[in-house]
Amino acid sequence: DIQMTQSPSSLSASVGDSVTITCRASQAISNYLNWYQQKPGKAPKFLISSASTLQSGVPSRFSGSGSGTDFTLTINNLQPEDFATYYCQQRYITPPYTFGQGTKLEI
Amino acid sequence: EVQLVESGGGLIQPGGSLRLSCAASGFSFSTSWMHWVRQTPGKGLIWLSRINGDGTSTDYADSVKGRFTISRDNAKNTLYLQMNSLRVDDTSVFHCARADSYGFDAWGQGTLVTVSS
């Protein structure tokens, strides 16, 4: 199975800041990498597919990049509603669909 | 509006069985791949199982193969997860999710299953 490792596990930032979350795959996965956002008590929300394609309705302050084994999620000009936990997920070899352990973005 | 609502969770003793349901609305359920994903504070999101639109193809994570069974009733727009031989480490919030060609584009809020004596 492909293992996904995110860093950092948690991150503190302020409104208006820019932050970057990293996701590393245990083998090359081309750009078959998704990002999700989850707020406490809520369902995960699909943010980015294919490493860099924003899903409909996702603000442009979110961006994703990477290919192969290393990927990043960047959020510019952090807004209060962006404080959440973010997960990466590979879809290169499935099943199983594997997720990173999550990065909690805190104020 | 796409909606997925899970039910059926609760407290169950080790070795017991439980059936989870996921009621779907707002989309063409019978043509959608559907999945179960579980979530624990310590291990994050863990994919469990998937089923194709007409129910003829299923896959499972190794951790639940032989114990869990995914199924669907397209007439009722409902997805199921039959869980047998439950273990303490199965304690999780269980989400159902719809998959499009790229990822899990709709999720339910989840139902909590607690396995404890």
Image: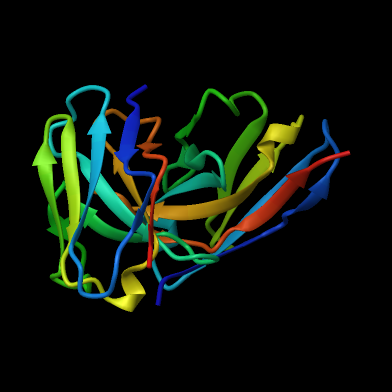
> Residue B84's spot in the image, x, y percent?
74, 33
Above or below A15: residue B87: above
Q: Of A91 and B79, which appears nearest the observer?
A: A91
> Residue A98's spot in the image, x, y percent?
38, 35
Residue at (40% x, 30% y) in the render: A96
Residue at (24% x, 71% y) in the render: A78
Above or below A79: residue A10: above
Number of residue marks: 0
When asked about the image quadrant of residue A71, the answer is top left
> Residue A23's spot in the image, x, y percent?
25, 39
When asked about the image quadrant of residue A53, the answer is bottom left
Left of B67 or right of it: where is A8?
A: left
Residue at (42% x, 59% y) in the render: A44
Residue positioned most to the right: B117
When asked about the image quadrant of residue B14, the answer is top right
> Residue B68's spot in the image, x, y percent?
64, 34
Q: Quadrant of the N terminus of chain A?
A: top left
> Colour scheme in the image?
rainbow
Residue at (89% x, 38% y) in the render: B117
Q: Quadrant of the C terminus of chain A?
A: bottom left
Left of B97 or right of it: where is B91?
A: right
Above or below A28: residue B104: below
Residue B101 visible here: no
Residue B112 visible here: yes
